[in-house]
Image (cartoon, rainbow, N blue to C red):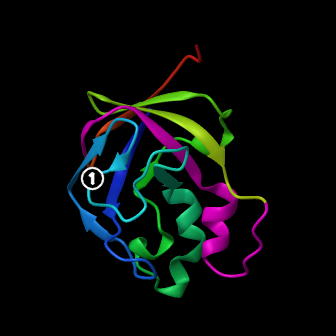
Amino acid sequence: MGKVSNLFIGKERGTAKIEYDTIELKTDFGVINDIHATEGRHQISILSKKSIDKFKANDLTLGTFEANIIIENIDLFKLAVGTKVKFGKEVILEITQIGKKDVLIEDHYNTMYHEGIFAKVLHGGNLKKDDLIEVTLND
């Protein structure tokens, strides 16, 4: 079973996201107070710690990767679009896109664009560091 490693909220475009111990997710919207929160299919961005570890030597902060949720011990980017994932006790997300294949970038953003997961919030609530992640069955 996977777990939440780090949580972030982006306050301004073009700057690193700020790390928090707890974030609040709103159904059909995204992370409260995040610059990218909106209706649609890219409400939440998720990235595996394993993907980020490829760039540790570059001394980049985790917020630079633009993910709201960093996870570990689970490879969500190998799941199918439409898969539902439970985070903690109440948050349920649906995977809407894996990576952005139409974008070519040669720096650390490349990781988000190839292994990043985008999701919409089916059921909101509070999410905390170390919350467990459980993949549920598709409808």
Place of residue 23 in the rendered image (x, y in percent of width and height, measured from the top left): 24, 51
Residue at the image position 29 percent from the left and 39 percent from the top: 131
Residue at the image position 44 percent from the left and 50 percent from the top: 71
Q: Which residues are magenta?
A: 102-127
Place of residue 32 in the rendered image (x, y in percent of width and height, measured from the top left): 27, 53
Q: As drawn, is 121 to the left or to the right of 112?
A: left
Res. 62 image quadrant:
bottom left
- In the displayed orientation, state which residue is furthest to the top: 139
Vertical comparison of 134 with 96: above or below: above
> Is 118 in the magenta?
yes
Going by the numbered disc 1, the residue's amino acid type is Ile
Vertical comparison of 108 with 2: above or below: below
Q: Which residue is mark 1?
A: 32
Q: As drawn, is 134 to the left or to the right of 116?
A: left
Place of residue 127 in the rendered image (x, y in percent of width and height, measured from the top left): 26, 43
Vertical comparison of 127 with 85: above or below: below
Which of 38 and 47 lies nearest the eye of the viewer? 38
> Is 44 in the magenta?
no
Which of 90 and 57 lies nearest the eye of the viewer? 90
Residue at the image position 32 percent from the left and 57 percent from the top: 7
Which of 55 and 69 lies nearest the eye of the viewer? 69
Q: How many marks?
A: 1
Res. 97 image quadrant:
top right
